[in-house]
Amino acid sequence: MSGSDERISGESRSIVVLPAALVSSAAMAGVIAAVQLIIYPSFLDIPGDPFAVYHQWYSQRITWIVGPLMVVELGTALLSLVVFPAGRWRWLGGIGFGIVIALWAVTGLVQVPQHSQLAGGYDAEVIEALVRGNWIRFWLWQGKLAISIVLLVAWIKSRR
């Protein structure tokens, strides 16, 4: 493949990967903000039997939103490393990828087990731990959004 063909192929990937990364990061930053500031704190206001029913309903529906977005986040973070295979922006793509791995780890190792505990019913201590610990995901997703913006802008500027 000639140099110009490789550039066109790379540009084709970039034109899909970087906007998709931005959209998924923005969506997750918004979702996690709503979850952190509204939904999780409201769990404390639903004691007793209604909590288990509400928690099951919430958990099923939020998974339909968060699951696909997290997969897109992982895929676009990995592909961003391909879009910037060398040069000054690859390190930022690497940080973005690291953030996504951290998000998957915190979600799987902390939040999922806490939600499993809450599936058994209302527990104020677990809910408070869920809210406190979720600040990590909140700030990681805000950081991932910032990285997605910078990478897309850098790529656009590099095409001029």
Image: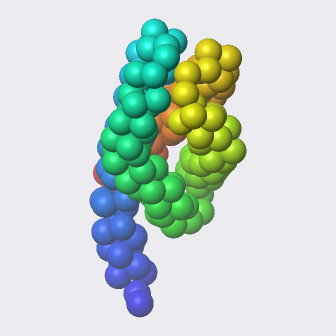
Compared to residue 57, the image places residue 131 above or below, namely above
| Count of residue discs | 0
Q: Quadrant of the N terminus?
A: bottom left
**Seen in the image, is 98 located left or right of residue 77?**
right
Using the rendered image of the protein, determine whether residue 95 is visible from the camera's viewpoint: no
Camera-side residue of 48 and 133: 48
Image height of 80 relative to 10, above or below: above
Protein image colouring: rainbow
At 49% across and 17% down in the image, what residue appears? 48
**Spot occupied by residue 54 in the image (x, y as percentages of width and height):** 39, 28
Image location of residue 130, percent across then percent down: 61, 25
Q: Is residue 129 visible?
A: yes
Q: Position of residue 29 (x, y in %)?
A: 43, 31
Residue 50 appears in which quarter of the rendering? top left
Closest to the observer, 86 or 42: 42
| Quadrant hosting residue 62 | top left
Is 12 displayed left or right of 2 in the figure? left
Image coordinates of residue 124 in percent, x first then y, are 62, 15
Is residue 1 shown above or below 111? below
Residue shown at the point (46%, 9%) measured from the top left: 45
Vertical relation: 130 (above or below) 159: above
Taking the view exactly as shown, the residue that stands out farthest to the top is: 45
Residue at 69 percent across and 44 percent down: it is: 109
The residue depicted at 63 percent of the width and 35 percent of the height is 117
Front-lying residue, 95 or 111:
111
Residue lying farthest to the front in this orientation: 49
